[in-house]
Amino acid sequence: MIVNVEDQRGLTGLAFPEEALKRLADDLAVEYDGVFSPQTVGRYVLESYAARLRISKVRAHLLNTTARFVRERLNALAQSMDAAPKDVPEVLFICIHNAGRSQMAMGLMKELAQGRVHVRSAGSMPATEISNSAIEVMKEIGIDITEEFPKPLTDDVVQAADVVVTMGCGDACPVYPGKRYLDWDLVDIGTVGIEGVRQVRNEIKARVEQLLNELVE
């Protein structure tokens, strides 16, 4: 259901730079009715758009990636508030740029878990796009990550996670009690050639398999 754009639904006072963002906020306000106020939804839309705008190279897909990013954040926030079901373990992979290691880890976990684990990724200093080397070595094993995009680290996705896996992001990740934190010491793929990226991919795969076995045993 799409809310009529003339219906402000409590979003008065929020300035949307594009009409499409206003429509997105209206749609999400309906989708999350009873969970979040329209004001909260509108603020999340604007914050997420601004975050994507700062790092996006290709503006043609900006609205689409913003919609995906804000929905992921709202779902995570709802889970952390126990306002949305959490049927499977939640894993968050974090690296500095969210362009290589954490994206490969997310792709591998999605492929291996087959719905038994829900996975997100983020970066403490997100890049503008995913590493071509990461895309290439993942394609070699039949996993396509070309539709993914770097995302900034936000509190909501950390709070929703059961397991937070860091990969060289230092102290950027907020620490919340009751969560399991793992630090995987992996080479930054930006410092090695394609064979080195393959080695990092293989090491991530082994670690993901071990973590998956622990989570779904």
Image: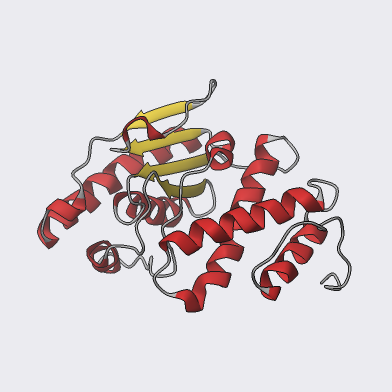
**Whether residue 214 is situated above or below residue 20 in the rendered picture:** above
Q: How many marks?
A: 0
| Pick the front one: 204 or 4 | 4
Taking the view exactly as shown, the residue that stands out farthest to the bottom is 60
Is 197 left or right of 147, judged from the image as shown? left
Quadrant showing the N terminus: bottom right
Residue 74 x, y percent position in the rendering: 66, 49
| Pick the front one: 51 or 86 | 51
Quarter-wise, where is residue 64 in the image?
A: bottom right
Q: In percent of the image, x 49 and y 79: which residue is there?
A: 60
Is 5 left or right of 125, judged from the image as shown? right
Q: In percent of the image, x 72 and y 35: which residue is there?
A: 82
Residue 63 x, y percent position in the rendering: 57, 71
| Residue 69 visible in the current orientation | no
Q: In percent of the image, x 72 and y 56: which residue is there?
A: 42
Residue 167 x, y percent position in the rendering: 30, 39
Q: In percent of the image, x 26 and y 61: which residue is there?
A: 134
| Pick the front one: 204 or 165 | 165
Is 57 left or right of 51, judged from the image as shown? left
Quarter-wise, where is residue 69 in the image?
A: bottom right
